[in-house]
Amino acid sequence: MRLFDPNQDALDALANSAIELILGVPNVDLEGLATSSDTAIQWVQTNVLNHWPSVKIKYVAVGNEVNPVEASSQFAPHVLPAIQNIYQAIRAQGLQDQIKVTTAIDLSLLGKSYPPSQGSFRDDVRSYIDPILGYLVYANAPLLANVYPYFSYSDNPTDISLPYALFTSPNVVVSDGEYGYQNLFDAMLDSLHAAVDATGIGDVEVVVSESGWPSDGGEFAATFDNANTYLDNLIRRAETGSPRRPSKPTEIYVFAMFDENQKSPEREKHFGLFSPDKQKKYSFGFSG
């Protein structure tokens, strides 16, 4: 499960559940954590140590989708210092191997993503992302990435087919050297793998911290059937690796547990596996 902020009621509810957790640090809290190690120590005490080990916190995601050249740019200078301060607070407790400290990005940081083997970070974000990657190599922590084929498809349905986006294409759609891509999710993920590799900084695992498809909202292809198909296939996809990383299954977090009926635009309200009244929307499950 992923929590985007340390909601204490949710953390209490997860106690002794054996559910592994990504615990989020909201962007608005980054500056305080970056500028004060004492604030970071207190944050870790309140939100991690007070619940550990009955809550299986696997990752602390320090910030979400911060981009140094877009709307969230004011948060960018604080991401790495906040990561480092929280890491040091966790390390002081000897928990740095059990609880990894990282951040979650979206793929807007990529300057090139097609073909996937040519994936690279934008020149104007390298001074932001490269030091973070260096820290992740040092701390042996993964990079969290939010990967949404829906948005890529809905933005460019002329060049991207719906079966390719939904994992239902019967054949390879994109041939890229030694790699063949039958679905857009793998192509997007491997473009990020290639971008990380191209920095030469070191090996960094990528965990998919969000992926989903809206079931309604008036937008192109936002239908119940498409969402059902995508999510069912996404869950199956987690059993395997990508063409560039075939040896290990991909760790994937589905966005989202509940429809969020107060969000906007309309399509953002319909990503849930459950309705706001807790009714299950789809028939599939997670049993292996």
Image: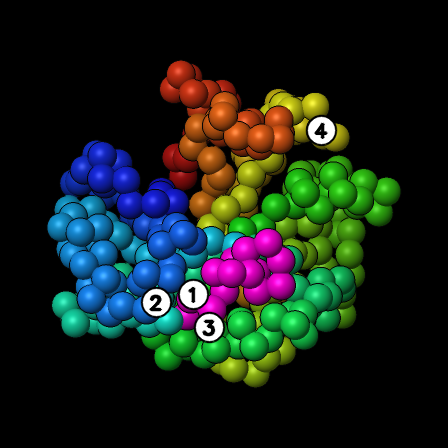
Q: Tell me the element at label 3.
A: helix
Indicate which label's residue lies in the foreground, 3 or 2: 2
Side of 59 relative to 66 (left or right): left
Q: Which quarter of the rendered picture does the C terminus lie within?
A: top left
In contact (CB < 8 Å): disc 3 and disc 1:
yes
Q: Tell me residue 185's x, y (percent).
A: 63, 50
Question: Who comes first in sequence, dot 4 or dot 2?
Answer: 2
Indicate which label's residue lies in the foreground, 1 or 4: 1
Q: Name the residue under label 2.
A: 34
**Toward which corner of the image does residue 3 lie, by quadrant?**
top left
**Toward which corner of the image does residue 225 lie, by quadrant?**
top right
Q: Tell me residue 222's x, y (percent).
A: 67, 28
Q: Tell me residue 110's x, y (percent).
A: 66, 64
Q: CA gap, disc 3 to disc 1?
A: 8 Å
Q: Name the residue under label 1.
A: 79
Q: What stretch of residues is rendered in magenta?
A: 66-80
Residue 243 falls inside the magenta stretch:
no
Q: Mark 4 points at which residue?
A: 219
Task: Check disc 3 and give the amino acid type.
Answer: Ile
Indicate which label's residue lies in the foreground, 2 or 1: 2
- Checking the image for residue 132, the label placed there is 3
Task: Check disc 4 and give the amino acid type.
Answer: Glu
Question: Who comes first in sequence, dot 3 or dot 1?
Answer: 1
Q: Tell me residue 188's x, y (percent).
A: 65, 56
Question: Who comes first in sequence, dot 1 or dot 4?
Answer: 1
Colour option used: rainbow
In contact (CB < 8 Å): disc 4 and disc 2:
no
In contact (CB < 8 Å): disc 3 and disc 4:
no
In contact (CB < 8 Å): disc 2 and disc 1:
yes
| Dot 4 alpha-carbon crowd within 10 angstroms: few under 14, some 14 to 19, many 20 or more | few
Side of 232 relative to 156 (left or right): left
Task: Check disc 2 and give the amino acid type.
Answer: Ala
